Image (cartoon, rainbow, N blue to C red):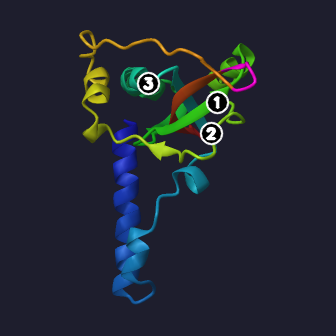
Amino acid sequence: MSTKKLITRELERGGDIVDKIFTGQVGWKDLFEKHTFFTEGYKYYLSVVAASRTKEAQLIWSGLVESKVRHLVIALEQDSAIEIAHPFNKGFERVHRCKNEREIEATIAGDLSHQVTDIKTETTDTANDPKHVAAANGEADNITVINGISKDVANGDHETMIYTTTYYVGIQLEK
């Protein structure tokens, strides 16, 4: 039911803006403003983090997690306390540099303090990634991935790169 409510809400919003355009109150640019999903859209958010030790493994794992997020949204919609469960249409891919297991666990739990700053956070582009698409569609059984290995840092410590994709679901509770 959330999808229908979201589409109806957006059509009504668009209709209101077009009415204002025709009366000269606003311009066409107002119809194409950026989304407000994170700024004004919802009071509550659910974040789901998929994490792996290799980039290749992350492509597959995040696809599987993305498909499970869709199932989670369907289950949330069945809860009488939730009016709308709105998944953001893309995940956010990040790379983290961790020095020990405690930092790895914190990163997996959603901590961004070990995020690599010289690599830009990207949004998922599932259309151009066949492994991600296969995993999201439940077809990843025949894909093999090599496990990630920590590498030595100059001072002898170990450093592990952790690749994460975070998916967000905006939640609107019943009034």
| Residue 31 image label | none
Q: Earlier in the sequence, mark 2 or mark 1?
A: 1
Q: Residue at x 69, y 33 (%)?
A: 114
Neighbours of disc 3 within 10 Å: few (<14), some (14-19), many (20+):
many
Q: Residue at x 39, y 24 (%)?
A: 56
Q: Earlier in the sequence, mark 2 or mark 3?
A: 3
Circle 1 sits on which residue? 97
Q: As drawn, is 110 to the left or to the right of 143?
A: right
Neighbours of disc 2 within 10 Å: few (<14), some (14-19), many (20+):
some
Answer whether residue 15 is magenta in the image. no
Segment colored magenta: 154-158
SS for callout 2? loop
State whether the magenta stretch is mostly helix, strand or loop: loop
- Quadrant for residue 70, please give it: top left
Q: Position of residue 94 (x, y in %)?
A: 54, 37
Q: CA distance from mark 2 to mark 1?
A: 6 Å
